[in-house]
Amino acid sequence: MLIILFICKILCTLITLPILLVTWRRLYSKKRSERSRKEIVVGIFHPYCNAGGGGERVLWAAVSAIQTRYPDIHIIIYTGDLDADPEQILNKVEKVFNLKIQHKLEFVYLHKRKWVEASMYPYFTLLGQSLGSVYLGIEALNSFVPDIYIDTMGYAFTYPLFRYIGGCRVASYTHYPTISTDMLRHVYRRVISHNNRRVIARNPFLSAAKIVYYKLFAFMYGLAGSSAEIIMVNSSWTEEHINAIWKCPLKTHRIYPPCDVKHLTELPLLSDEEKSNNIRIVSVAQFRPEKNHPLMLRGMYELRSIIEEKIRLILIGSCRDANDEMRVKDMQDLSKHFALDENVEFKLNIPYSELISELQQATIGLHTMWNEHFGISVVECMAAGLIVVAHASGGPRADIIEMQPGSQNGFLAEEAEEYARIILHIINMRPEDRNTIKMAARASVSRFSDEVFEREFLRTIEPFFRQKQE
């Protein structure tokens, strides 16, 4: 009897689910046909469009490219930034990214963004955020049904929703895989990190359970991600991991994110005398846990113990929410604990003009994130004429920093002591040797320009618009 009941439930599910899918698809198709706008509508899913980070630069550069190539296209931005009106958002885009966006676009405000925030899920965070993204995606689809859906934040679990239920053409630009083989390797090796707590890393049974959870999640993530028709990734590191999990390399395109290299490479290089012989070290990174600001402070502490010279670390970044603001307070407390409060300065949400001034006055650019997906700030520091010390992993190692003699354009490090040793080496270099690395760095960044991104992005998504117009 139990077997018969089980079989009946399976049959009911197999019959009911397709009926529901067809019904929902017809509903959204009807919504699309009844909307007042008859031109092609592109919906771009970016719940944190006002955050001011590298991912947001990609979003707005993509919007600018579409507006330039297809002036009759209407663009919808799905955002959860309820505290900012469209005018404020676009003014910030111009101030932070030096991008002028035409006002022929519409913001659809989402009220359920909290369901994609990590703080909502103390356990099973990846699964919780992914299911939360589906919930947020349903709100977006109910608010407005686009013809073309582009996700620029990496919420892969929304792709089947918009493609198979919403009837949209689906493209994605992935900055960082939600789960990677490196994350699995960290759990397997029981390495403590921001996404592998000490209590789990130290317990073999919890580590084994987490490996099973990660593998099941990676399988679901691969199914969801592969449903996108056009897949764009921002670096060879991201491409490798996406191909390993999504398993669709033929429709995956590597498109480096846009960096403001043209303007930055034209900035005059100031001499040490013009910088008053002060050693200024700049970090440009959002105040998120994975950016690993504590490693910068530990490197400064090590540096303070081996050098008498006056040095200053300038931490420049944007804060998305109260959690980021709390991290800044924690970093300020940590700098005081290391007796570095006179050597460390925090600059939050500064305008583009002030960022340029800081880059000109600095000598060294610092980057400490493990497995950074690409590293826009690394490229921009190099373009501005800084000597960059980046983490020896992810995009900086795979795509940006060259260490071979004769073509060296920066340095790579992993531990605090190594960062301090390399920074000391840079400080003690002859000015002409530093200039050689600076010029090599500037010469290497043209492949990451805004123009290259726009050309490759438009070439990749062009089939969607061609088919719609036909």
Image (cartoon, grey):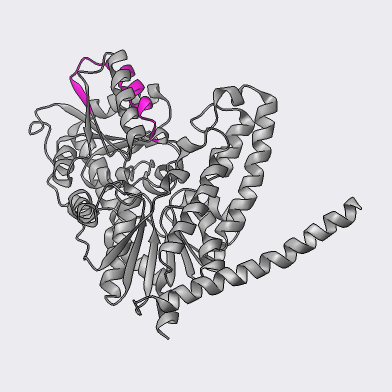
Question: How many numbered marks are there?
Answer: 0
Image: magenta residue range: 291-313
Q: Position of residue 44 (x, y in %)?
A: 38, 61
The part of the image, by quadrant, that contains residue 450 is bottom left
Q: Residue furthest right?
A: 1
Q: Position of residue 362 (x, y in %)?
A: 19, 34
Q: Residue furthest bottom?
A: 470
Q: Is residue 468 above or below residue 44?
A: below
Does residue 306 appear in the picture of this structure?
A: no
Q: Position of residue 456 (x, y in %)?
A: 37, 66
Q: Nearer the viewer, residue 186 or 156?
A: 156
Horizontally, is 440 left or right of 470 in the view? left
Q: Nearer the viewer, residue 12 or 151?
A: 12
As for residue 286 lying within the magenta part, the answer is no
| Residue drawn 22% across the image and 62% down it | 101
Does residue 257 appear in the picture of this structure?
A: yes
As for residue 312 lying within the magenta part, the answer is yes
Q: Position of residue 145 (x, y in %)?
A: 43, 68
Q: Nearer the viewer, residue 401 or 75?
A: 75
| Residue drawn 64% across the image and 34% down it | 210
The part of the image, by quadrant, that contains residue 160 is bottom right
User: Which part of the image, by quadrant, shows the C terminus?
Assistant: bottom left
